[in-house]
Image (cartoon, rainbow, N blue to C red):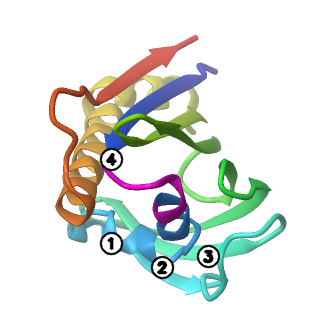
Amino acid sequence: MKLYQLRSKQILPISKEIAWKFLIDPRNLKVITPDAMGFSILSGGDRPMFPGQIIQYKVSPFPGYTTKWTTEITHVRDGEYFVDEQRYGPYALWHHKHFLTSVPEGVEMEDIIDYKLPFGLFGQLAHPSVVKPQLQKIFDYRREKLIALFGEVQHTTTSLEFKSS
């Protein structure tokens, strides 16, 4: 089974503290998720993120398909990073690291997601035409929404990169 990785970086003209306060509030995930995904928190999102926190969502990653997605916040280093791991949901594996780094322009937000798809060869065949474009759309939306909320750093690049092994 293939392991895929998505890496995203974005610089925002805000302090690390402001970015951290926004990111550790689970309710803000809805703010940066496309409306078409029908995202809602069912339980566990009423407190800032902490190790061991279980958050259950409802999400429609693809039209006509709605599922519950349960994640556990497994690691938190205050002001630096947190990790969420899928416990139940549409992926065979989902391990998402969120890092914040102060830079001269503000803060660099970096996401590294390692994931595997279910359904063996069928999942691998669906990756380039279904899964990868959907993740691209989600992270493009997220980038634009964060710019709308916090502003844009001129003369910087954002990046979104996919790898597989």
Point out the stretch of residues depicted in magenta. Answer: 13-18
Q: Earlier in the sequence, mark 3 or mark 4?
A: 4
Residue occupied by mark 2 = 27
The residues bearing labels 3 and 2 have C-alpha atoms spaced at a distance of 12 Å
The residues bearing labels 3 and 4 have C-alpha atoms spaced at a distance of 28 Å
Secondary structure beneath dot 2 equals: loop
Q: Identify the image quadrant of residue 149.
A: bottom left
**Can you say whether 157 is above or below 141 in the image?**
above
**Image side of residue 86 versus residue 14, left or right:** right
Of badges 3 and 2, nearer the viewer stands 2
Marking on residue 31: 1
Q: Outermost residue, top direction?
A: 165
**Image side of residue 15 versus residue 93, left or right:** left
Whether residue 52 is visible, yes or no, is yes
**Image side of residue 108 versus residue 65, left or right:** right
Residue occupied by mark 4 = 12
Q: As shown in the figure, which amino acid type bears the numbered disc 4?
A: Leu
Of badges 3 and 4, nearer the viewer stands 4
Of badges 2 and 4, nearer the viewer stands 4
Question: For the residue carrying disc 3, how many other residues have a C-alpha within 10 Å: few (<14), some (14-19), or many (20+)?
Answer: many
Q: Identify the image quadrant of residue 61.
A: bottom left
Q: As shown in the figure, which amino acid type bears the numbered disc 3?
A: Gln
The residues bearing labels 1 and 2 have C-alpha atoms spaced at a distance of 7 Å
Q: As shown in the figure, which amino acid type bears the numbered disc 1?
A: Val
Q: As shown in the figure, which amino acid type bears the numbered disc 2?
A: Arg
Residue occupied by mark 3 = 56
Q: Earlier in the sequence, mark 1 or mark 3?
A: 1
At x 65% / y 77%, what residue is drawn?
48
The foreground one among 54 and 98 is: 98
